[in-house]
Amino acid sequence: MKLSDFDYALPPELIAQHPVSPRDAARLMVIDRTSGAIAHRTFRDLPEFLTPADVLVVNDTLVIPARLHARKSTGGAVEVLLLRRAYQEGSGPGVELWETLVRPGRRVPMGARIKVTEGVTGEVIDSSPSGVRTIRFSTSRPLLEVARTVGEMPLPPYIHEPLRASDDYQTVYAEVEGAVAAPTAGLHFTSDLLTRIRDAGARVLSITMHIGLGTFRPVNVERIEEHVMDEEWYEISSETARIISSVHRPGRVIVVGTSAVRALETVADEDRTIRAGTGWSRLFIYPGYRFKLTNALVTNFHLPRTTLLMLVSGFAGRELIRRAYEEAMEERYRFYSFGDAMLIL
């Protein structure tokens, strides 16, 4: 399958720069995979499509303010994006190793030293062909604590305007710190909407999958089957695994976001039971994948030529998604992280 099969041209004015307010006022495209029918609703209508036999699975990862501004020992400014902590030899009290992206990378070679703020310095000790640099930080307090003070939210490059509120790029149920990008399908939920869903009888369950470098890394191969996903860490509790494994028709597992789909499909067995625990997933889902667990999907409108669009196309069919995206553009839906949503049944 070719990368160009997942390309499309989007008018720039359809790229949402801010979320709507209230969040559940976003538009919702409802797609029926069986009939191919497409309907246009509002996200707050979501409870109408759920039953007491269903479970709605959300990703409770919390985005860290992972973008740090630093200066080299020569005085030049650089930007460091924290990806994940590397727990390996050389770390310990006052010393933390982190996998990072550095911009401009060519100015920060092996051995380069940087200063983030008073009491926080770093040295590049490893560099991979993919551009990831491991930095050994010497810090007087935990680096995440430092990031909460001086760091910035790592907004996608197509967001050109500052956040209007500090929590705009967090879901209302975010709890577990560790992501460098938001699970954006969940940005449409409000506390009131979650209450309405529970009051209607559907169960809302949380899993964790920390969204990492894979969100930023483009697909650079023409045959998509050759693409290798980056590892992302997940955690699924025993109770959550038990409840999801107990769902049988007519009940459905309705998953919010592509990251949660990947986590669940990673641990799902052919009999629709899932395994609790923690681990790393490199699961790449594209057309032809046989979904073991996911019955319905809540997702956003994704960038062209991305693994997220490939996953959605694998779930609903490439031609149906192509038609849905064309209709979304005709209807002036808002696209990408702060844009509108679709429910695929």
Image (cartoon, rainbow, N blue to C red):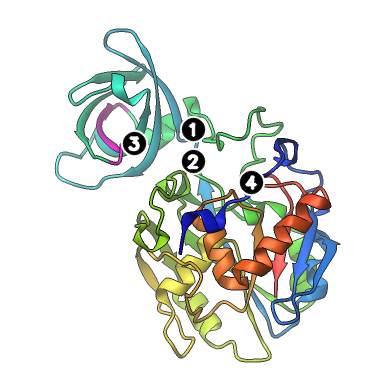
Q: Quadrant of the N terminus?
A: bottom left
User: Of the residues under marks 1 and 2, which one precedes in the sequence?
Assistant: 2
The residue segment tinted magenta is 130-140
Number of other residues with Cα within 10 Å of mark 2, as a class: few under 14, some 14 to 19, many 20 or more: many
Is disc 3 placed on a helix, strand or loop?
strand
Of callouts 1 and 3, the N-terminal one: 3
Q: Nearer the viewer, residue 45 or 17?
A: 17
Q: How many marks?
A: 4
Can you identify the residue that label 4 sits on? 337
Structural distance between the alpha carbons of marks 2 and 3: 13 Å
Report the side of 301 relative to 193 (left or right): left
Disc 3 from disc 4: Cα separation: 22 Å
Mark-to-mark CA distance, 1 and 3: 17 Å
Q: Which residue is mark 1?
A: 148
Question: Tag 2's secondary structure?
Answer: loop
Q: What amino acid type should be assigned to the residue bearing mark 1?
A: Arg
Is 248 part of what is drawn in magenta? no
State if disc 1 and disc 4 touch (CB < 8 Å). no
* Other-residue count near label 1 (Cα within 10 Å), few / some / many at <14 / 14–19 / ≥20: few
Q: Earlier in the sequence, mark 3 or mark 4?
A: 3
Q: Please name the residue that numbered disc 2 is placed on.
A: 64
